[in-house]
Image (cartoon, rainbow, N blue to C red):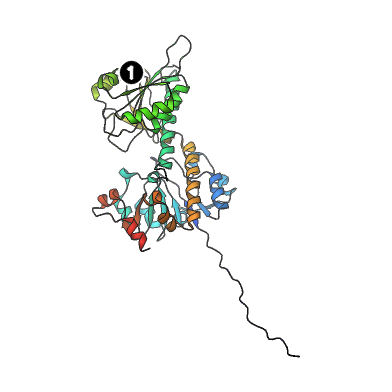
Amino acid sequence: MNNPTPLEQLVRSAVAPRQVSIGLPDPMSPEERRFPLTPEAAAMLIDRGFTVKMEAGAAKSIHFSDEAYTRHGVEIVERAEAFRCDIVIYLPAISEADAHRLKRGALLMGFAHADSRSPRAIKILLQKYVTAIALDKITDAAGNHPFADILREIDGRAAIAIASALLADAVHGKGILLGGVAGVNPCELTIIGADLAALAAARSAVGLGAMVRLFDNDIYRLRDLTAAMGPGIIASALHPRVLRSALHTADIVIACSLRQPFEVSAEEVADMKRGVITFDLDQSTAPVFPSMPKVDLALASPCDNGPEDGQRVCYVNAGSAVPRTAAMAVSNTLLTMFDDIIAAESPLNALKLIPGLRGAAYTFLGKPVSNDVAKMLGVRAVDINLLLQFS
């Protein structure tokens, strides 16, 4: 009887995938108090297979302790280690020193902050082949801007909450209710611009009982907003006499984004009520109230707006007054985006497969792929689609 001859057999082997690390450095910026991830959102990313590393004390602006993050599996590290991660979520404009801390080929996510970008920091990103994405420029399949839109909605609702508190302050305000009571006229709100922030502000104000007038130079935007609001507001085109009358009697004035530039003159500002509370929620264009001094709510508390004081200031950065709400909203949107990245199996594939993510990049493979960034550097932008074909 012949003995059986042993034969070679293939043995299945596998290499464990490397965990992708996400870094959360401390913003360390007085202009940007918002933070990208809550402890619960960080835990959900860890459950998806990521490693999350946060700089010690980074979430203090949204009143979460380091312990709240460590309980959910987040590693607390030094600043340099948070910047050495594969993906770094850093909402302010990055500085030269922090750009040097990034690892070569990292993915950097933050807000655009076009006015405060450092050309030298951008050059460092290019030298390190960092892929930089402006979150507020990302679009979805329907053409919406998920991050920018939720931040606009927060701005609109925050403006009404702040204005209501200022008006009701008996010492520093007028000591009046936004909505009034039976027999007492409600406050008047004038909104210039019919965008998502305007819709959020109008809904909040109408819910509190205020009288709302809304103006825009785009009739289609007015039609869409009034359809969403119903008969609760008065909508009008930007007729100078009608607008001036509304500004004259308004207790609150909110400027939002417009398709065409618009400016309220110094004479019209002087004709507004004493103690009027004014916001400009769109800082991407020229100011609507150039004669008014700005008060950035990320840097300072609201000023005394009592009628006897007579001063008129324009508040900006309203959403930074509620950074924890912003953190929760941004966290929700980030989780959806990371689900798309996981489905694409890598950030590079995500750029190839998701046009809205690709269009938000401003540096890629050592090249500026945004016209704004290229113009700032004095060079020509490179089409990211061409770079992706060879990557």
Give the image location of residue 26, x and y in percent.
45, 47
The answer to whether any part of residue 159 appears in the image is: no
Please state which of residues 287 and 119 is positioned toward the viewer in this rendering. Answer: 287
The residue that disc 1 covers is 274
Q: Is residue 340 left or right of residue 308?
A: right
Vertical comparison of 228 with 184: above or below: below
Residue 340 place in picture, x, y as percent? 48, 51
Name the kind of residue labelled 1 in the image.
Arg
Eyeballing the image, is 339 above or below 103?
above
Residue 254: x %, y % from top left: 36, 27
Task: Specify whether residue 306 is in view.
Answer: yes
Label 1 environment density (alpha carbons within 10 Å; few <14, some 14–19, many ≥20)? some
Most extreme residue toward the bottom, as rendered?
A: 1
Image quadrant where residue 298 sits? top left
Q: Secondary structure at mark 1?
A: loop
Query: Residue 210's x, y, as percent?
Result: 43, 19
* Relative vertical location of residue 39 with respect to residue 165 in this rendering, above or below: below
